[in-house]
Amino acid sequence: MRELFAAGQDQPSVREVSERSGVHEVTIYRRWGRIESLVLDVAVTQLNEEAPFPDTGDLRRDLLDWARAVAGQVKTREGFALFRALAAATSPLGGEQSGPLAADAAGYLRQRTTQLQRALDRVAEAGGKPPTVAHVFDVVLAPIYLRAIFGYERPDTDLDALVDRALNPA
């Protein structure tokens, strides 16, 4: 699947995946039910492998390293295709607001939220005033994804400023 994305196949079919992987189409359907579920499974696996939330104890550094990993990932054809799969699975416009696909996407997002919340909680326990997870997503991740989608700037533009804005709201 990842090879198909890297080759420019933004919406591969079960047949293409079957031919590339050597796994029978029936097996793919039995395991994932539909191509969107397979794409989401691949997307979540890759995001977890390539852009895990760092946990060094230095929140600014962790946020910056994470932002760099996410920006680097969405700059690739494969990473962008996988981001689109995750976005489609969680979008109310995509019509898949419930069911296994939405549940898988929601599970990934919960995992990310939990990882980030742990880091923010440590700052609070040390007497700091950390931002909320939603604020970090809005101020750091949203610009990265919008830049990747619309191409008005490179996704990795000025990540230091985004992280600093998230940590020190005006």
Image (cartoon, rainbow, N blue to C red):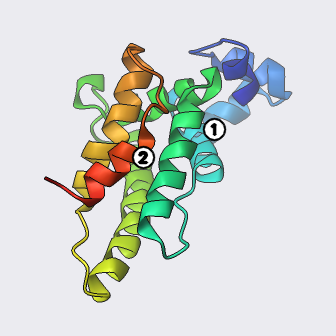
Q: Does the image show residue 78?
A: yes
| Viewer-closest of 169 and 23 | 169
Image quadrant assignment for residue 130: bottom left
Mark 1 secondary-structure assignment: helix
Q: Does the image show residue 35?
A: no
Please report whichever mark, 1 or 2, sits nearer to the chain's N-terminal start: 1
- Residue at image point 13% right, 53% down: 170
Q: Residues within 10 Å of mark 1 (few under 14, many from 20)?
A: few
Disc number placed over residue 160 in the picture, else none = 2
How many angstroms separate mark 1 from mark 2 (CA)?
Answer: 45 Å
- Is 31 placed above or below 3 here? below
- Is 26 placed above or below 14 here? below
Residue identifier under label 1: 30
Residue 51 x %, y %: 58, 49
- Residue at image point 63% right, 16% down: 12
Name the residue at the bottom extreme.
126
Tell me: 155 left or right of 132: right
Residue 122 x %, y %: 36, 81
Residue 163 x %, y %: 36, 51
- Residue at image point 57% right, 26% down: 75
Name the residue at the left extreme.
170
Residue 16 x %, y %: 72, 15
Q: Nearer the viewer, mark 1 or mark 2?
A: 2
- Is 107 placed above or below 80 here? below
| Viewer-closest of 138 and 162 | 162
| Viewer-closest of 32 and 134 | 134
**Residue type of the residue flagged with mark 2:** Asp
**Residue type of the residue flagged with mark 1:** Arg
